[in-house]
Image: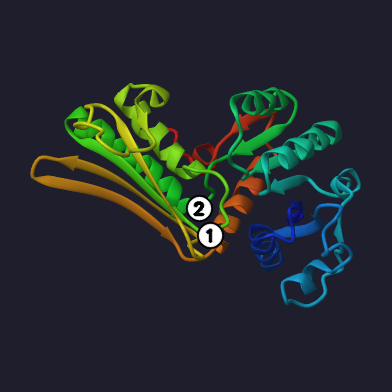
Amino acid sequence: MTQSLAVAILGAPGRMGRALIEATLRNSALQLAAAIARDDSAALGIDAGALIGRPVCGIAITADRPAALVSAAVLVDFTQPAVALAALADCVAAGKAIVIGTTGFNAAQKEEIAAAARVIPICMAANYSIGVNVCLKLSEIAAQLLGSNYDIEIIEAHHRHKVDAPSGTALALGEAVAGALGIDLRSNAVYSREGQIGARVAGTIGFATVRGGDVIGEHSVLFLGDGERVEISHKASSRGNFAVGALRAAQWLAPQPPGLYSMRDVLGLNG
């Protein structure tokens, strides 16, 4: 009988944290080893099962990350950059793998993550939905085939509470398209338009951001040509898809050597 993988979840009381707890408890190949929250969280001490309206599971919400990591093989993080980096340091010290779902890291923080990946296995992705990662691959293929004769626009929508823009997924889509075209996204991205902006500059990749309501996540890549338009879109109706993908990444990551991996590695989409 295969031993279940022990998973610790960071940011347990949050929207993604609850979805991860739910998905972990439903997966017989996984074991919930720890559920972690901030030291000022009102959820501290509450059983993780009770937190999501399920039967008690025997795992109380804790703020002690190092202690929580003792019994875990992999930490799954969907929080904020500063929290994620503090947890990353704990994982390096404990020799534990980490799945990073947090977005909004700056260049220096990404370098810190890359350095940690020389010591422990890390999976880092802007989006853990399997469908989104398929869209990333499709967008890359479309850019290769349609080429620079098509104008490219990326539109994303999220709930009113999201703090970074464009979303990490939108930027990942932009990177996929730019890479396929052989251009640098940083030099060719247009993030805002207002006033007399003039005609569209050829070769640029435009981004549009929508925030409001309880939208979980919607992304579209538009390839706009003369006489036709190609759209690749993904709309999430549940955070469960992200949780299932992140846990699939955790299962794949646990036996890997130190390194910085992505969902493309997990899904075998790098070919």
Q: Residue 207 appears at what percent x and percent y?
A: 36, 40
Check disc 2 and report the residue beneath it: 129
Label whose residue precedes the other's in the sequence (2 or 1): 2
- Asked whether, in this view, residue 19 is left or right of residue 5, the answer is left
In this picture the colour scheme is rainbow
Please tell me how crowded label 2 is: few (under 14), some (14-19), or many (20+) other residues with Cα within 10 Å: many
Element on which disc 2 rests: loop
Return the residue found at the far left: 227
Element on which disc 1 rests: helix
Q: Residue 228 appears at what percent x and percent y?
A: 12, 46
Residue 134 sits above or below residue 26 on the image: above
The residue drawn where x is 25% and y is 26% is: 203
Please tell me how crowded label 1 is: few (under 14), some (14-19), or many (20+) other residues with Cα within 10 Å: some
The quadrant in which residue 172 appears is top left
Instruction: Kindly identify the amino acid type of the residue bearing the numbered disc 1.
Output: Asn
Check disc 1 and report the residue beneath it: 241
Pointer 2 with pointer 1, Cβ within 8 A? yes
The residue drawn where x is 53% and y is 37% is: 265
